[in-house]
Image (spheres, rainbow, N blue to C red):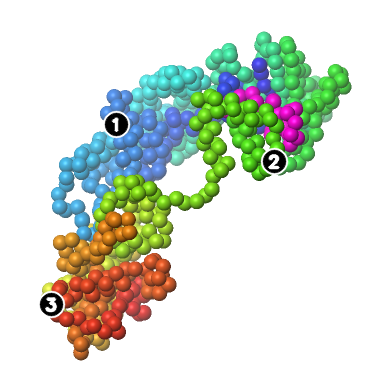
């Protein structure tokens, strides 16, 4: 059997998956573009690494072709995936690949753990693996970079590229890929891998023959290689006989074919309209041909050739010919049948028969049996009919027979049950089962205020982050949480230092506040994500702006201290088991125990007429207001929770009686981004 079309590109993306759905083996007779073959991508990315100085994107384009992996399997693709995460987290690019200096561990996202407490055994193993992956990459590409920088002519550059392919054992790896594809039952892919090595060598030979001694820079050479790979197309012969052949009329040659199906017989495509986009007219071409000048075929010749192609296609079948045409295009515009259809209809007195993508609307079984040809496809059509039945419409009795047949087959029953579930499905969120919840979270839940707020805002977000423990991939860049950490740590450390030196914040002049704040930020900055603020000029500018903002916040806090009687009594005050303050602990309705732990940024104290006055200060890096409706719905519980911790444990902690009047309990949120409104 053969399926012929005038332009194969129109049907190629439809035909191959459709035949696969019906378990019919098929071969598409076309020349395949090999620009995105692993070998083509390996060459292009290797040249981009040299040309663009080891950018992250280029390095891992090359790595993900799997052609750099050692043949002995000592380094796997999973190891390279870990390397990619490591490189992103550490910001490795450019000279850091080839400078020979050992890499450090992933910088901590927390300022409290700067990695100076010694490396564990797991960290050492991790770094050892990363260095091994780095060596695999730089041994091939680093040497290739040196050779390309020394090469000045096209011949020398082609030699450098060929030697890199040899060092990476590309020929052997392609042979293995070919054998694997053949073992998996994909002979086309197997032949494609086998032909690629010779095609790339032919491309290099052609470049040496055309411009061997011409001087080229790396950018021009890479562009020429990419152009050659873009035009590299491989044609494959049918790997087996028991296949349906799908091809175009001008390329495919048929032999011993019993059944031919011709698709797309519409006006303007069959026969194809010749494109007269040349400079010469038909009369001028005829005159030049009479004078012995050889030219390409003109419009007249193309029309004759087109007739011959159509005649060959129509007469190729020895048993049966099948013609079809669409009645509309993708945009719904009407299409007219080809004149070939009209001629065949007139010669043999035939009548067209419409083909529908879905069974007819009529309830009679006529026309429905043609959709029961394959178990998988009939199952999808059956579900469509059952949906109609679910809406109260009648369906032919034959579909109930099809349903019973699928129920009786063990291979079809699981898929049928899943599809039936879609008919009766209702999008209703169900709570986790008790057993599942306790396996995820345990019977004693130790949580923080921010975790409770996250659960109230979006239970699924809480499930993903704390139940499944999913994390975003760490990137070497400054983000809002990092800035918040720096603000928080700078103001806390400044307050601690003033307390240790027995100095009051209000005793400092504005200039002293700014000086102390800048000094504190400079001490903290190197600990933030492996000195990210010191890594580039851009981050250096951000560093200066952050110092200015923290300085302004420090001045405002000093002004607040001068105008009031409150003095810091607790900084970085932890509450939880074995901490300065006890946790908030209560029993849930399901018998589980919840324990709330956390850290209060700062607690101030002042003497009142009826006892101590306590004030909670929480440092925020963005505009923040305490909104009562957010408190009511559980979206903003932090400040009130901190107050509850203090009220329940203050007398034991301080050894003094606190003020019993609610109006004496105050809250203050210091906004570092907008200190004027603090």
Magenta extent: 356-378
User: Sequence-wise, which precedes: disc 1 or disc 2?
Assistant: 1
x, y (%) of residue 119?
A: 16, 47
The residue that appears at 52% across and 29% down in the rendered structure is: 413
Taking the spot 75% from the left edge, 23% from the top edge, the residue there is 323
Q: Is residue 299 left or right of residue 251?
A: right
Residue 329 horizontal side relative to residue 193, left or right: right
For the N terminus, the image quarter is top right
Q: Position of residue 258 (x, y in %)?
A: 69, 12
Identify whether 129 is placed above or below 1: below
Residue that appears at 38% across and 29% down: 67
Numbered tag placed on residue 75 in the rendering? 1
Q: Residues within 10 Å of mark 1 (few under 14, many from 20)?
A: some
Residues at discs 1 and 2 in contact (Cβ within 8 Å)? no
Q: Are marks 1 and 3 in contact (CB under 8 Å)?
A: no
Q: Considering the numbered disc 2 on the image, is that residue within a helix, a strand or a loop?
A: loop
Task: Quote the CA–CA distance across marks 1 and 3.
Answer: 62 Å
In this orientation, does residue 319 appear?
yes
Q: Is residue 28 above or below residue 227?
A: above
Q: Which mark is residue 655?
A: 3
Task: Based on the picture, tell me whether residue 211 belongs to the magenta stretch.
Answer: no
* Pair 1/2: label in front: 2
* Neighbours of disc 3 within 10 Å: few (<14), some (14-19), many (20+): few
Cα–Cα gap, marks 3 and 2: 79 Å
**Left or right position of 456 against 550:** right
* Alpha carbon separation for disc pair 1 and 2: 60 Å
Residue to which mark 2 is pinned = 393
Main SS of the magenta part reads: loop
User: Could you say whether the residue bearing mark 3 is in a helix, strand or loop?
Assistant: loop
């Amino acid at each position: 059997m053969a399926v012929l079309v005038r332009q194969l590109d129109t049907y190629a993306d439809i035909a191959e998956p459709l035949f696969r759905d019906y378990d019919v083996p098929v071969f598409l007779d076309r020349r395949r573009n090999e620009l995105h073959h692993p070998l083509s991508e390996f060459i292009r990315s290797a040249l981009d690494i040299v040309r663009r100085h080891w950018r992250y994107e280029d390095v891992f384009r090359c790595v993900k072709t799997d052609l750099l992996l050692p043949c002995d399997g000592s380094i796997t693709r999973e190891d390279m995936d870990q390397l990619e995460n490591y490189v992103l987290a550490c910001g490795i690019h450019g000279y850091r690949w080839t400078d020979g200096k050992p890499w450090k561990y992933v910088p901590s996202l927390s300022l409290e753990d700067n990695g100076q407490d010694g490396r564990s055994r797991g960290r050492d193993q991790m770094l050892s693996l990363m260095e091994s992956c780095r060596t695999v990459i730089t041994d091939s590409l680093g040497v290739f970079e040196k050779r390309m920088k020394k090469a000045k002519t096209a011949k020398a550059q082609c030699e450098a590229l060929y030697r890199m392919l040899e060092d990476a054992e590309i020929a052997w790896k392609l042979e293995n890929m070919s054998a694997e594809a053949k073992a998996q039952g994909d002979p086309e892919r197997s032949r494609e891998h086998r032909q690629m090595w010779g095609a790339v060598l032919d491309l290099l030979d052609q470049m040496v023959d055309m411009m061997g001694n011409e001087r080229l820079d790396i950018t021009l050479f890479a562009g020429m290689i990419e152009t050659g790979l873009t035009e590299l197309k491989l044609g494959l012969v049918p790997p087996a006989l028991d296949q349906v052949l799908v091809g175009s009329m001008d390329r495919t040659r048929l032999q011993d074919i019993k059944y031919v199906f011709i698709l797309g017989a519409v006006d303007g495509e069959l026969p194809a309209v010749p494109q007269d986009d040349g400079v010469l007219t038909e009369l001028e071409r005829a005159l030049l041909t009479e004078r012995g000048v050889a030219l390409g075929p003109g419009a007249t010749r193309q029309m004759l050739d087109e007739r011959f192609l159509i005649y060959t296609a129509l007469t190729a079948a020895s048993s049966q010919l099948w013609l079809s045409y669409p009645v509309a295009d993708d945009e719904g515009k009407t299409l007219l049948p080809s004149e070939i259809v009209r001629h065949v209809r007139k010669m043999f007195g035939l009548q067209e028969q419409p083909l529908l993508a879905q069974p007819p609307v009529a309830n009679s079984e006529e026309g429905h049996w043609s959709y029961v040809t394959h178990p998988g496809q009939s199952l999808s059509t059956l579900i469509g009919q059952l949906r109609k039945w679910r809406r109260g419409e009648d369906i032919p009795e034959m579909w109930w027979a099809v349903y019973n047949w699928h129920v009786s087959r063990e291979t079809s029953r699981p898929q049928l049950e899943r599809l039936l579930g879609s008919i009766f499905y209702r999008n209703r969120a169900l709570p986790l089962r008790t057993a599942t919840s306790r396996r995820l979270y345990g019977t004693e839940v130790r949580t923080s205020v921010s975790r409770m707020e996250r659960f109230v805002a979006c239970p699924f977000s809480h499930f993903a982050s704390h139940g499944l423990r999913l994390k975003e991939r760490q990137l070497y860049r400054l983000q809002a949480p990092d800035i918040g950490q720096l603000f928080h740590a700078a103001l806390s450390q400044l307050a601690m230092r003033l307390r240790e030196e027995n100095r009051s914040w209000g005793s400092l002049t504005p200039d002293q506040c700014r000086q102390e704040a800048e000094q504190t930020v400079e001490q903290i900055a190197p600990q933030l994500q492996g000195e990210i603020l010191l890594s580039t000029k851009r981050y250096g500018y951000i560093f200066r702006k952050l110092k200015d903002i923290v300085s302004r916040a420090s001045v405002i806090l000093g002004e607040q201290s001068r105008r009031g009687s409150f003095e810091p009594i607790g900084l970085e005050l932890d509450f939880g088991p074995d901490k300065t303050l006890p946790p908030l602990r209560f029993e849930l309705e399901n018998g589980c125990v919840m324990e709330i732990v956390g850290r209060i940024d700062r607690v101030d104290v002042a003497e009142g007429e009826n006892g101590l006055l306590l004030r909670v200060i929480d440092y925020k890096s963005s505009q923040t207001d305490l909104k009562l409706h957010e408190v009511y719905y559980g979206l903003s519980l932090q400040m009130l929770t901190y107050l509850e911790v203090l009220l329940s444990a203050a007398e034991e902690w301080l050894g003094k009686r606190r003020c019993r009047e609610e109006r004496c309990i105050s809250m203050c949120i210091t906004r570092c981004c907008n200190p004027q409104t603090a």
